[in-house]
Amino acid sequence: MLWTIFVILVILWLLGFSLHIGGAFIHLLLVVGLVILVINLLSGRRTAV
């Protein structure tokens, strides 16, 4: 699920560069998506000792 959202955000971000649609909103969504991705990756690597 998270990877699907991440891919969609990257596609929208690239469309924003090429077609100039959405402007700052797409960049904001991409940053939020990256932050969530990093948090998920870091929390997923914790192991119980």
Image (cartoon, rainbow, N blue to C red):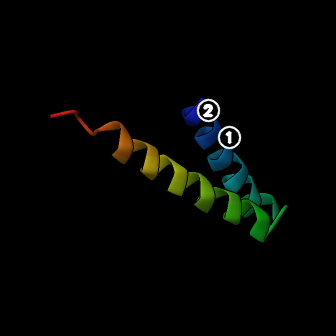
> For the residue labelled by badge 1, is the local secondary structure a helix, a strand or a loop?
helix
Q: Nearer the viewer, residue 6 or 14?
A: 6
* Residue to which mark 2 is pinned: 4
Drawn side of residue 44 relative to residue 30, left or right: left
Quadrant occupied by the N terminus = top right
Q: Is residue 46 left or right of residue 49?
A: right
User: What's the residue at 79%, 68% (across, down)?
Assistant: 23
Label 1 environment density (alpha carbons within 10 Å; few <14, some 14–19, many ≥20): some
- Residue sitting at x 36%, y 37%: 44
Q: Amino acid at mark 2?
A: Thr
Q: Any mark on residue 22, and which?
A: none
Question: Residue 49: image x %, image y %?
Answer: 14, 34
Q: Answer with left or right where residue 13 lies relative to residue 25.
A: left
**Residue 27: percent from left, percent from top:** 68, 64
* Residue ID for mark 1: 8
The residue depicted at 57 percent of the width and 35 percent of the height is 2
